[in-house]
Amino acid sequence: MIEHGSTQRQPFHRFFDCWLGELSSTLEQLVSDANHHKDDDHIDDDSDLYSLIGKAVGHYEEYYKAKSDGAKGDVLSMFTPTWLTKLEDAFLWIAGWRPTTAIHLLYSKSGIQLEARLSDQIPLFSCGDLGDLTSNQMFRIDELQKKTIREERAVTEKMATLQESSADPDMVDLSNTVSKRIRKKKIDGGSEIDGIVELVIEEKKNELEKVLHMADVLRMETLMSVVEILTPLQAVYFLIAAAELHLRLHEWGQKMDAA
């Protein structure tokens, strides 16, 4: 387990590399348990699945705790993550994955597993995987998606307002003042102006940290809500799909960047 405080003593990218390694190990455990339960229909005790689900979800919680700690020291680095690839950067929403992506992932994996069963010509056979979502589960997922979309929009609007504030009267007046000094090559009073600039930028950074926190909270809440709707075995299949997508996107991006 990575200590949360370690992110304050080392660059976040080092934490991220270690975190990815642990995610890969957790993925192998998830796959192993899923196969074990799939091969043995007589297993009625899901305690091992609950324990593993808790470990996997806790791993994501650890990531957002570390990210929050890192943002307190340097929030701008969270919006320009050097630990991610260009491919991953292209899919970012407020320095992370879009919360509704978790629901789209669930629908995609459910459809894939259901289609695989149909192709085997045993559509009525229950495997306990994501192809077996009940009508009640589908209703709850749909409600979660609607709720998440509303909350996503609210956070997006806050981010838009913050981005537009880069051209608010204070910023425009300050940029003009500094530009005039540069044109006139004035030296005196520079430290006072620098102090004002630092103060104004610091306020923007504080607002960025608040919006980032809102986005990360929504990401984690959505992930946990999806897991709560599913059965233990379904949750394991979902977490497998999430980890696989996360790891493979990172690897594909690394290969593209290297090329």
Image: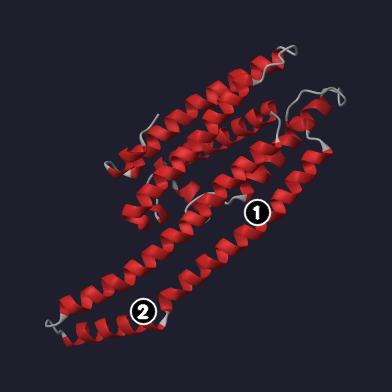
Q: Are marks 1 and 2 in contact (CB under 8 Å)?
A: no
Q: Is residue 55 visible?
A: yes
Q: Which residue is mark 2?
A: 171
Residue at the spot 21% in from the left edge and 74% down from the top edge: 194
User: Residue 155 is drawn in which quadrant?
Assistant: bottom right
Within 10 angstroms of label 1, few (less than 14), some, or many (20 or more) residues?
many
Within 10 angstroms of label 2, few (less than 14), some, or many (20 or more) residues?
some
Query: Depth check: 47 or 15 in front?
Result: 47
Residue at the spot 60% in from the left edge and 19% down from the top edge: 48
Q: Which disc, if any, is residue 71?
A: none
Q: Is residue 94 visible?
A: no
> Colour scheme in the image?
secondary structure
Q: Which residue is mark 1?
A: 148
User: For numbered disc 1, what is the local secondary structure?
Assistant: helix
Q: Position of residue 210 (x, y in %)?
A: 45, 60
In this rendering, the answer to whether 164 lies above or below 99 is: below
